[in-house]
Image (cartoon, grey):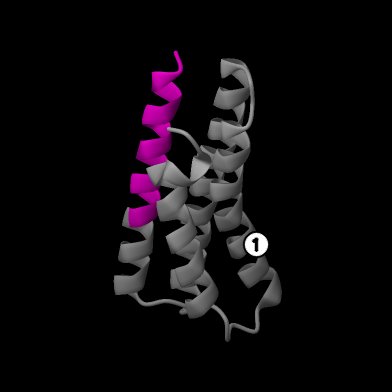
Amino acid sequence: MRNFEEILSRQRSQELTLKFYKIFKDIRDFSFRDQLQKAAVSISNNIAEWFERKSNNEFRYFLYVAKWSSGEVRSMLYLAKKLNYITEEKFNEFYDETKKISELIHWLIRSLK
């Protein structure tokens, strides 16, 4: 890879973040909406920041932060479903995509060991 734009997990996390911005744009629960969006943005931003680091230890740290943010997004999705902000179908779609992104990050981390 020559730049962070080529990293699949970053690309997919940005696409998911865009979906969150669109689907939650009318939610008036601003603290919920902001927290979900921040966690989603954190995934792609930490992958990009990881790419700019010089050591494998720094690489791993930022990838772990991105992975942790993925878990935070999944937790927020459960709340979104329980608060009826999203349907069961949307929950499953978003959950599965976030889980896949987390797996892709996991394999990036393993490749650094």
Which residue is identified by label 1?
A: 35
Closer-to-camera residue (107/48): 48
Q: Residue at x 70, y 70 (%)?
A: 31
User: Which quadrant of the figure contains the C terminus?
Assistant: top left
Rendered location of residue 6, percent (x, y): 42, 43
Closer-to-camera residue (87/20): 20
Q: Residue at x 29, y 72 (%)?
A: 89
Rendered location of residue 88, percent (x, y): 32, 72
Question: Where 46 sits versus 55, above or below?
Answer: below
- Total marks in image: 1
Question: Where 55 sits versus 27, above or below?
Answer: above
Question: Where 112 sits versus 81, above or below?
Answer: above
In the picture, measured across the screen, residue 69 lies left or right of residue 100, that is right
Residue at the extreme right of the image, as rendered:
31
For badge 1, the amino acid type reads: Gln
Magenta span contains residue 104: yes
Residue at the extreme top of the image, as rendered:
113
Magenta span contains residue 17: no
Residue 93 sits in which quadrant?
bottom left
Q: Residue at x 32, y 55 (%)?
A: 96
Residue 55 sits in which quadrant?
top right
Closer-to-camera residue (55/60): 55
Rendered location of residue 14, percent (x, y): 49, 58
Main secondary structure along the magenta-highlighted residues: helix
Callout 1 environment at 10 Å: few (<14), some (14 to 19), or many (20+)? some
Rendered location of residue 50, percent (x, y): 59, 33
In the picture, measured across the screen, residue 68 lies left or right of residue 81, that is right
User: Which quadrant of the figure contains the N terminus?
Assistant: top left
Q: Residue at x 50, y 63 (%)?
A: 17
Q: Secondary structure at mark 1?
A: helix
Residues in magenta, as a range? 97-113
